[in-house]
Image (cartoon, rainbow, N blue to C red):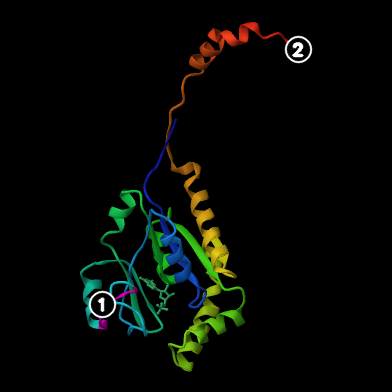
């Protein structure tokens, strides 16, 4: 009856470091069967426990700059003195085969995507408060005090951009935050601008069915 655009959604998720956006997106993908998280490339050093090709593709600054020249990125940005970029390949294939693609990227990257693909869905993940954010950054135990202060300061500035997104999700509790993101995606897929064709049976056809329906012949009006 309705022909709806069956392409996957391009979902851009940002939020300050420590807000929990990676955990939310990973949980989302593990509990849905048609979503994929794009793996970014970065020139920053791997943290303890990070795996090449799973968390990021780790490259040198020079290698990253080479890829920029070759036009390999959908977008890229410099964040705390390191390059981060979304590789172009695969994204279109996934979207065309109906799989939602999630980009977990910073605000500069999100704004670039907004210019390129305004129909993408933009979700901002907020920490419940700044003290919790500080605790989460410290709790990672992977960075020096200076790095934590740098990240905390960046986070503070990033929150001012929340209104450039379509939705905001406060990550007070992980399951709760994941179900909110799922609800947003579900709602997004019901938007009328995804309708490609409305193909209803004709009015005459249905009226004819009512007229010839024997059941109605024996109905007596109750007054
Ligand atoms: P982290 O160093 O904590 O892994 O990431 C720092 C910031 O870079 C985070 O906000 C993260 O979302 C963002 N980021 C990761 N990958 C990309 C990317 O491909 N493009 C952009 N613009 N930002 C990214």
Residue for badge 1: 64
Give, as a single range, the part of the protein colored magenta.
55-61
Q: Is residue 175 visible?
A: yes
Question: Which quadrant is home to the N terminus?
Answer: top left
Name the spot of residue 87 as percent of width and height, x first. 29, 66
60 falls in the magenta region: yes
Residue 43 point in image, percent of width and height: 30, 81
Q: Quadrant of residue 81?
A: bottom left
> In the image, is 143 to the left or to the right of 173?
left
63 and 27: which is toward the camera: 27
Quadrant in the picture for the C terminus:
top right
Towards the viewer: 15 or 47:
47
Tell me which corner region of the image, top left, top right, bottom left or bottom right, holds residue 156: bottom right
Residue extending furthest top? Answer: 217
Is residue 202 toward the left or the right of residue 173 in the image? left
Residue occupied by mark 2: 222
Q: Is residue 166 visible?
A: no
Residue 89 drawn above or below residue 55 = above
Label 2's element? loop
């Amino acid at each position: 009856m309705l022909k709806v655009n069956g392409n996957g959604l391009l979902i851009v998720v940002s939020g300050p470091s420590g807000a929990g956006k990676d955990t939310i997106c990973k949980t989302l993908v593990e509990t849905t069967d048609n979503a994929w998280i794009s793996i970014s490339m970065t020139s920053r050093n791997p943290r303890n426990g990070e795996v090449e090709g799973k968390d990021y593709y780790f490259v040198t600054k020079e290698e990253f700059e080479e890829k920029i020249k070759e036009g390999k990125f959908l977008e890229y940005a410099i964040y705390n003195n390191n390059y981060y970029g979304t590789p172009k390949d695969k994204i279109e294939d996934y979207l065309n085969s109906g799989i939602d693609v999630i980009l977990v990227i910073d605000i500069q990257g999100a704004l670039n995507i907004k210019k390129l693909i305004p129909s993408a869905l933009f979700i901002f993940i907020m920490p419940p408060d700044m003290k919790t954010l500080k605790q989460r950054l410290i709790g990672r135990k992977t960075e020096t005090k200076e790095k934590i202060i740098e990240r905390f300061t960046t986070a503070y500035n990033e929150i001012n951009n929340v209104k450039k997104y379509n939705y905001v999700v406060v990550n007070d509790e992980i399951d709760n935050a994941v179900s909110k993101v799922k609800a947003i995606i579900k709602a997004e897929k019901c938007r009328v601008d995804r309708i490609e064709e409305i193909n209803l049976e004709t009015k005459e056809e249905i009226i004819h069915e009512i007229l010839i329906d024997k059941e109605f012949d024996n109905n007596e009006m109750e007054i």
